[in-house]
Amino acid sequence: MQAKKRYLFLLSGACGLVLLFYIGGVRLPAAAAGGRGRRERGRAGYRSDQPWPHFSDPLHAFLPWDQADTEGYNLHVSPRHKREVNAGVYKGKRCRMDSCFDFSRCEKNGFKVYVYPQQKGEKISESYQNILSAIEASRFYTSDPGQACLFVLSLDTLDRDQLSPQYVHNLRTKVQNLPLWNDGRNHLVFNLYSGTWPDYTEDLGFDVGQAMLAKASIGTENFRRGFDVSIPLFSKEHPRSGGERGFLKYNSIPPYRKYMLVFKGKRYLTGIGSDTRNALHHVHNAEDVVLLTTCKHGKDWQKHKDARCDRDNTEYDKYDYREMLHNSTFCLVPRGRRLGSFRFLEALQAACVPVMLSNGWELPFSEIIDWNTAAVIGDERLLLQIPSTVRSIHQDKILSLRQQTQFLWEAYFSSVEKIVLTTLEIIQDRVLEHGSRSSLMWNSHPGGLFTLPQYSGYLGDFPFYYATLGIKTYPKFTAVIHAVSPLVSQSQPILKLLLAVAKSQYCAQIIVLWNCDKPLPAKHRWPATAVPVVVIEGENKVMSSRFLPYETIVTDAVLSLDEDTVLSTTEVDFAFTVWQSFPERIVGYPARSHFWDSAKERWGYTSKWTNDYSMVLTGAAIYHRYYHFLYTNFLPSSLKSMVDQLANCEDILMNFLVSAVTKLPPIKVTQKKQYKETMMGQSSRASRWADPDHFAQRQTCMNKFASWFGAMPLVHSQMRLDPVLFKDQVSILRKKYRDIERL
């Protein structure tokens, strides 16, 4: 009897289901896939291959009820529509380096970049011209397309918003007609703005094919990881080179400022990107959380204004944006029309820790930068939790985040040139994968642009990581004496200098760089010493050859000397001892300084002996051998050619380079008497110091170098390091470097 009841119950249930399907009351999953049910799941981020919903859009719960039926609310584009649009744009969406890049083009000449010549009649925006200029001024540039590994268009692709005056029409045809385009293979396309009102998709208006994108506001859904490069959104006022330093002058303990969290910007009443900014008033308290928006922008803002507009506009005008920026611990960076925002770079420079609210944004240079060390990555759906989240961050962490913002700003974002060079270095690391940089190189001082992996793959070979790795420098140095005069007498200063240096307990070897027009002296002309003396003929007899990375230099430290330098063994020992504590800096004796000549509006050079200096000349200085490699491989040929033509200024250029890398001044040490450039005689053509134009040339060099670096990298200092008990009224026998005090 019980079995019969169960049978009847199952039969009646089955009949009921058949009836429901027949009249359409319930739809099968397959039938719902193309209907409203699928669209609703699409809005929630549902994908059939995921067991759990994927929430990619902002929660609509933050939208005020009085805007629920406005035009802006209904203009949201479904993920399905976005995918359909992007499918047409990114036909090479599956591109990766191994499938869409020809590595063979880079094998012969290395990583060289070719910029197409500008076509007549084609307009180029100032920002794109800055990008092209940065490439052409870099060491990667080649004017020969046959040598190129990478190609960059001269057609302006930065602004692809059809409503923009910078929009280039017929770009699709123009690109396809380029003879070297080859479906974009080995090409790099720069872009800041894509799509247009109302949905602002990532449509560039032409098929990029197999080209790599260096794009701002790129979404993770379209980002081809390991192929594209996400770059920051920057304004047309962003400097081409150099750029201002970060605004953090000193660290305050505890690291809190007047405001905890701030934002000041536009609020969009219609169109995409309005949800998050429309909800900011919920967490604004007008005390330590100041989140201000205005709807007073655009031509039709009054047409779409809501009940909050007037109140928001009044509150907005009460606060100065710069004052808020410089006096806040955290800065909110919500998405705008597009995923990226100018607020991002502004916050970095101001040492205001960015709080990111832009779901789906691939952060700039995410391939190399660990943004968890410099920013707070928020979630648009959890806006109400942001204030409590930032309040819970410990002050030690805040200090660390703030310091990292300054490092990243100055290393990669302070100028268009740095943004472009970082992009190219990332691509070069992919091409030369065996010689790529480590994460530590990219995320710690001095940054990836100044640590060339071609020098070494071991961090311990660079002077910047000794403290991090807990290692010490090699306890010996190599002396490099620059010889430009013929050896005619055994009493010449070069021979006295050689003997004094050879007696140093820290000297491993002496290299004499023979840049004299006369033939090399016979071996017996050189005095016998306890350390090896190697004589090398200078390459092309030019000044820059003294800074070549010679393989014979096997020590970390290089003692650079002019042939007429007068130093004792004690002075050499003391200088090397000091350098061991500051291996990333130049340490030496003859100091010089720079100043700004307001009357002539240019930089000046002075050799006056004062308490202030910014350079230590390489005629008697110790530095790390890595700077030889950096001088040769990082600096452009134009600057080195200038030095060689003048036979002057190589020491100034080395100081510019080291200060640009370290952001620190050199270190002057005490010598027993004033260092003087001993002239070889007024009639001697070999002496640079006898040239009456010598000083004027150095003035010119200062300004030429500052122009290339984009700013003045030299840093003034008044610190001089003396031996312990120097000039103290104690017995000379108690002093280690007693000879320094003797006249």
Image: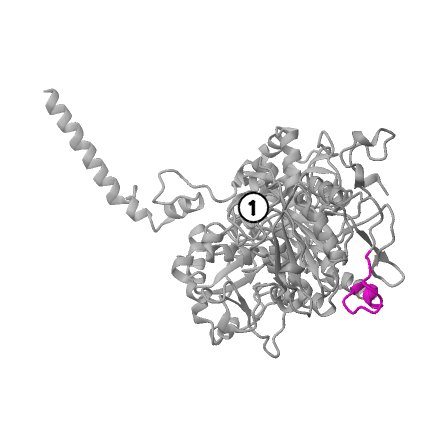
Residue that extends furthest to the right in the rendered view of this protein: 599
Give left or right: position of 197 versus 731. left
Q: Is residue 492 above or below residue 403?
A: below
Give left or right: position of 83 versus 67. left
Q: Residue at x 60, y 43 (%)?
A: 444
Q: Which residues are magenta?
A: 677-695
Q: Where, by quadrant of the figure, is residue 190 drawn? A: bottom right
Q: Residue at x 48, y 53 (%)?
A: 435
- Looking at this view, is 423 or 1 the one in front? 423
Give left or right: position of 408 versus 73. right
Judge whether residue 172 can be spotted in this image.
no
Judge whether residue 742 can be spotted in this image.
yes
- Looking at this view, is 734 or 37 the one in front? 734
Give the dominant element type of the magenta stretch: helix, strand or loop: loop
Q: Residue at x 25, y 43 (%)?
A: 21
Q: Which residue is mark 1?
A: 461
How many marks on residues?
A: 1
- Looking at this view, is 667 or 426 the one in front? 667
Image location of residue 100, percent across then percent down = 41, 62
**What is the quadrant of the C terminus in the image?**
top right
Image location of residue 730, percent across then percent down = 85, 28
Describe the element under mark 1 as helix, strand or loop.
Answer: helix
Image location of residue 679, percent across then percent down = 82, 61
The colour scheme used to paint the residues is one colour
**What is the quadrant of the N terminus in the image?**
top left
Residue that extends furthest to the bottom in the rendered view of this protein: 120
Q: Is residue 443 magenta?
A: no
Image location of residue 531, percent across then percent down = 62, 48
Q: Is residue 680 magenta?
A: yes
